[in-house]
Image (tube, coloured by chain):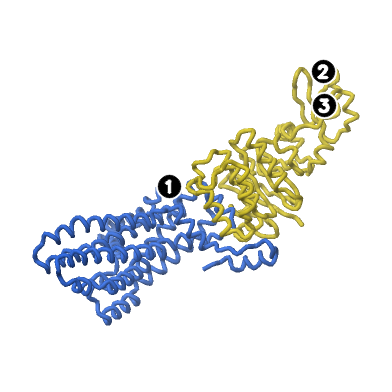
Amino acid sequence: MACIEARGLRKAFGATVALDGINLRIEEGRILGLIGPNGAGKTTALNAMLGLTSYQGELKVLGRNPWTERDQLMRDVCFIADVAVLPRWMRVSQALEYLAGVHPRFDRAKAEGFLARTTIHRNSKVRELSKGMVAQLHLALVMAIDARLLVLDEPTLGLDILYRKQFYDSLLNDYFDRSRTIVVTTHQVEEVQHVLTDLMFINHGRIVLNCTMDEFDGRYVEVMANPEQAAKARALKPIYERQGLGRSILLFDGVGREQLAAFGEVRTPSIADLFVAVMSNPAAQGAGL
Amino acid sequence: MNRQGNGMHDAVAAAPAVAAATRPLYWSVRRELWEYRSIYLAPLILAGVALLGFLIASIGRALTTSDLVQRRTVLEEPLSFATALILGAAFVVGMIYCMEALHAERRDRSILFWKSLPVSDLTVVLSKASIPFIVLPVVSFAITVATQFIMLVLGTLVLAGSSMDVSALWAHASLFRESMGLLYHLVTVHILWYAPIYTWMLLISAWARRATFLWVALPPAALCIIERFVFRTHHILALLEYRFSGPKEFDMSMSGDAAGHMVHSNLVGFLISPGLWIGLLLAVAFLAAAVRLRRCQGPI
């Protein structure tokens, strides 16, 4: 069963089109990275899925219409919008009490267990916690909810490297169990590359790339061509070329590794490199659709 | 009131082992009391001030007055003063609360957290409306009655110390009758009559991006001014005054000697007055609009 299904999803703010007729289908048990430049429509897409904004077109999340059934949908969906949305006046103990009181799938003991691993004091107010601790608290609350879909919008924005690493580690080790679905947007793509099972690029309100990470590894190859070989390599029509350390780095879509190995060192590109390639080369867009 | 009922059933059917009983409306009201402690602190503090004033001024005066009848009057006076102080505080706190309630959560972005939980917009708005309509009247009633009781006990001690018959004080200012009058006043004026005031403020707090108070006051003020210059009349201003000052013609609660039939005729008169029903209709419309706005609004 599809966790999220959209057909012709459209949203405009005045003259600005944030979502320009998106079609997508996200199966259950996937970890999808939604990557795009600022203003590409990522957050609008997530907001539509979470029932935070109205939209045109068809959208079903876990079989429900998010705009009209947000409260029921939120029994099965969790989201962390960004690090600073927990109410600052609230005490940690109050957050636990409140969630236990309103959420049928919240396991208080589990949340207490996650919190015990941190230095967060039960009696502290959110405003007294550091940014990293607030993120830890929010993650502990969310991971204690037995949800089917978790949506993370820039969850690690403004956190230091230690907290960021810890965040994704506990998400993978303590939460993800292959029956849940996770959708994450982030600008720190290198940190999620090993976490994702699916990748989606979005730009100007359209999906410009959509593939699984297995496809990604199979299809995209980067070769560091020696200067004398560069011209030959270019004949194979790379989707992007950049210069680095005196050599040409060429990115290919669907060209065999063996064939490319003749020109120089071959490797799988990072998501960030492919992102730059796709965003700066309109010809490469639509690849994988 | 609890719209979660149906949804609960679905959740239980889907995962009988995990789903726990939830009370979203109850916990949403608790949440409001965590965030806005002035709801009970402000009336408590004013009750404390009234008691302190009573101890210092009234008892002092009573002890220096040689005329016993006058002494009794001096001890009774602060009772209604304390009541007015506490009810006034509750009214002001209620208005400030309503102007904040649906605005603060958008201002501090916490609306994104609240909306990530299975609590409907209707439950949220009802829980916020319950503060001026249920919580504040109950709180101010309890605090007022307790304050009056303490004052009477203190007054009794003073009178007893001067070997005067104390039963007159208790008979004259019957605590029970005072309480019933207070209850009548709270229900008719603070809940039913002020309903459109509170709900208008809730609506604006859900709508305005900033300067909630300005948007609360501006439309009625503009209407008054336009009416003044175009028609040279003051009907809207008079209506507003009437709304804020309360339906005095039906309110006998503050005079302690209301007889049974008086209460009855006043109540009937109040219940058939168009002002009451127009106000209540407006209140329902404002609340419904606030629920719709809560769904569309995000952080500001």
**Label 2 is placed on what type of residue?**
Pro
Q: Which residue is mark 1?
A: B210
- The letter of the yellow chain is A
Are the residues under badges 1 and 2 in a single subunit? no
Residue pushed farthest left?
B66
Q: In which quadrant of the rendered view does residue A281 lie?
A: top right
**Rendered location of residue B13, percent (x, y):** 69, 67
Q: Which residue is mark 3?
A: A223
**Is B182 drawn above or below residue B232 in the view shown?**
below
Q: In which quadrant of the rendered view does residue A197 lie?
A: top right
Category of crowding for the residue at label 1, using alpha-carbon neighbours closer than 10 angstroms: few (below 14), some (14–19), many (at least 20): few
The front one of B247 and B235 is: B247
**Label 1 is placed on what type of residue?**
Arg
Q: In which quadrant of the rendered view does residue A58 lie?
A: bottom right
Looking at the image, do the residues carrying marks 3 and 2 touch, with CB atoms under 8 Å apart?
A: no
Apparent side of residue B251 relative to residue A265 in the rendered image (left or right): left
- Tag 3 subunit: A
Q: Which residue is mark 2?
A: A227
Q: Quadrant of the C terminus of chain A?
A: top right
The front one of A141 and B212 is: A141
**Is A207 drawn above or below residue B185 in the view shown?**
above
**Is B136 drawn above or below residue A144 in the view shown?**
below
* Residue B8 visible: yes
**Is A62 drawn above or below residue B271 in the view shown?**
above
Total labels drawn: 3
